[in-house]
């Protein structure tokens, strides 16, 4: 795992978008794993800018989102399908048929989870997985105590996640669906590269647990420590509780891989 500290949330999101753009230019058929949430909105805005300004091409890539709420239709204003359409898909040249999210309205949710895993496999696996972190340490909707080898399945959301996501549902945690389909921790760890973005002081304590704490199903993001190629891009506010901050800065300043991203 590598931690990259950007001066602020905007530069952190831009750095993530530039890493995605570099991967996409190297492999236009990239299979992208996508996340939703407020943190990711800035990344998608940067990717839209790169598409419009530099012709970043999404035409032959495929996308698989981490999760979707159960019980709200795709055209519901708070569905993750709607979020993706609004923030990215409708603004770039991705082929709609190549964009995938779990179907939270499927009559047989277990079959839908198995279908989603098969689709990912049939696409050749995820090349680059974008991730945020929940206030309870989740990645996707892998809430505390999720098995670290779990696959796509249904999960009940924790009260802390309902609270975190309430602003998208008019501020009322009771309005947030109680369950979701999510890729499992094992599904995420199978991605060839993981890229997590964490910003803001409200995430500082959980970020430190995920990056520097023990690997535990109580903080499913800590499982990323097992991944052979995982970068965590953070802003100064989110980095506030990290013990190894000087070391992380030194790595970013000295690794040749990051030369083109420094000073951006
Ligand atoms: C949603 C997802 C979640 C979010 C996390 C952070 O698709 O994967 O794990 O990334 O809950 O959400 P925000 O950015 O809204 O704090």
Image: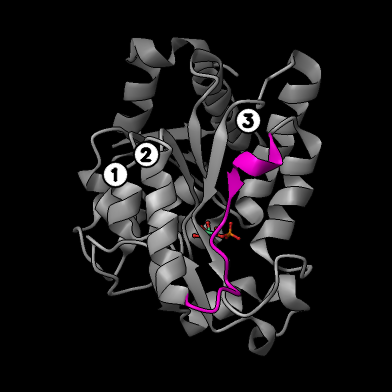
Determine whether, in the image, residue 27 is placed left or right of residue 41. left
Check if mark 3's residue and mark 2's residue have beta carbons within 8 Å.
no
SS at badge 3: helix
Which mark, residue 190?
Answer: 1
- Distance from disc 3 to disc 1, alpha carbons, whole Å, reads 25 Å
Q: Residue at x 51, y 37 (%)?
A: 32
Q: Which residues are magenta?
A: 95-108
- Count neighbours of disc 3 (C-alpha within 10 A) and say few if under 14, some if 14 to 19, many if 20 or more: many
Residue of label 3: 14
SS at badge 1: loop
- From the top left corner, tell me how far across and down residue 7 is, in percent: 57, 33
Q: Residue at x 60, y 19 (%)?
A: 264
Residue of label 2: 125
Q: Residue at x 65, y 27 (%)?
A: 58
User: Of label 3 and label 1, which has the lower sequence position?
Assistant: 3
- Distance from disc 3 to disc 2, alpha carbons, whole Å, reads 25 Å
Please tell me whether residue 32 is drawn above or below residue 59 in the rendered image: below
User: Is the CB of the residue bearing disc 1 within 8 angstroms of ligand 1?
Assistant: no
Check if mark 1's residue and mark 2's residue have beta carbons within 8 Å.
yes
Q: Nearer the viewer, mark 3 or mark 2?
A: 2
Q: Nearer the viewer, mark 1 or mark 2?
A: 2
- The answer to whether residue 65 is magenta is no
Q: Is residue 137 visible?
A: no
User: Of label 1 and label 2, which has the lower sequence position?
Assistant: 2
- From the top left corner, tell me how far across and down residue 260 is, in percent: 50, 10
Q: Nearer the viewer, mark 3 or mark 1?
A: 1
Q: Could you tell me which quadrant the N terminus lies in?
A: top left
Magenta: main secondary structure equals: loop
- Count neighbours of disc 1 (C-alpha within 10 A) and say few if under 14, some if 14 to 19, many if 20 or more: some
């Amino acid at each position: 795992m590598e931690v990259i500290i950007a001066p602020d949330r905007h530069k952190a999101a831009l750095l993530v978008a530039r890493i995605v753009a570099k991967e996409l230019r190297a492999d236009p058929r990239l299979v992208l794993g996508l996340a939703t949430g407020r943190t990711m909105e800035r990344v998608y805005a940067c990717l839209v800018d790169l598409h419009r300004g530099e012709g970043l091409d999404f035409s032959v890539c495929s996308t698989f989102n981490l999760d979707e709420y159960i019980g709200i239709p795709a055209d519901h204003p708070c569905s993750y399908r709607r979020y993706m359409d609004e923030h990215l898909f409708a603004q770039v040249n991705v082929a709609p048929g190549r964009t995938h999210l779990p179907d939270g309205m499927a009559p047989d949710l277990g079959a839908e989870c198995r279908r989603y895993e098969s689709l990912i496999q049939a696409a050749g696996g995820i090349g680059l997985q974008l991730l945020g972190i929940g206030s309870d340490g989740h990645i996707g909707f892998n809430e505390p105590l999720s098995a670290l080898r779990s696959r796509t399945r249904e999960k009940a959301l924790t009260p802390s996640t309902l609270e975190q996501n309430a602003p998208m549902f008019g501020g009322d945690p009771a309005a947030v669906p109680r369950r979701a389909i999510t890729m499992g921790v094992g599904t995420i760890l199978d991605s060839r590269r993981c890229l997590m973005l964490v910003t803001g002081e409200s995430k500082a304590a959980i970020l430190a647990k995920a990056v520097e704490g023990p690997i535990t199903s109580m903080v499913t993001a800590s499982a990323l420590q097992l991944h052979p190629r995982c970068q965590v891009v953070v802003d100064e506010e989110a980095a506030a509780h990290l013990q190894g901050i000087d070391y992380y800065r030194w790595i970013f300043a000295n690794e040749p891989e990051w030369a083109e991203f420094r000073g951006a």
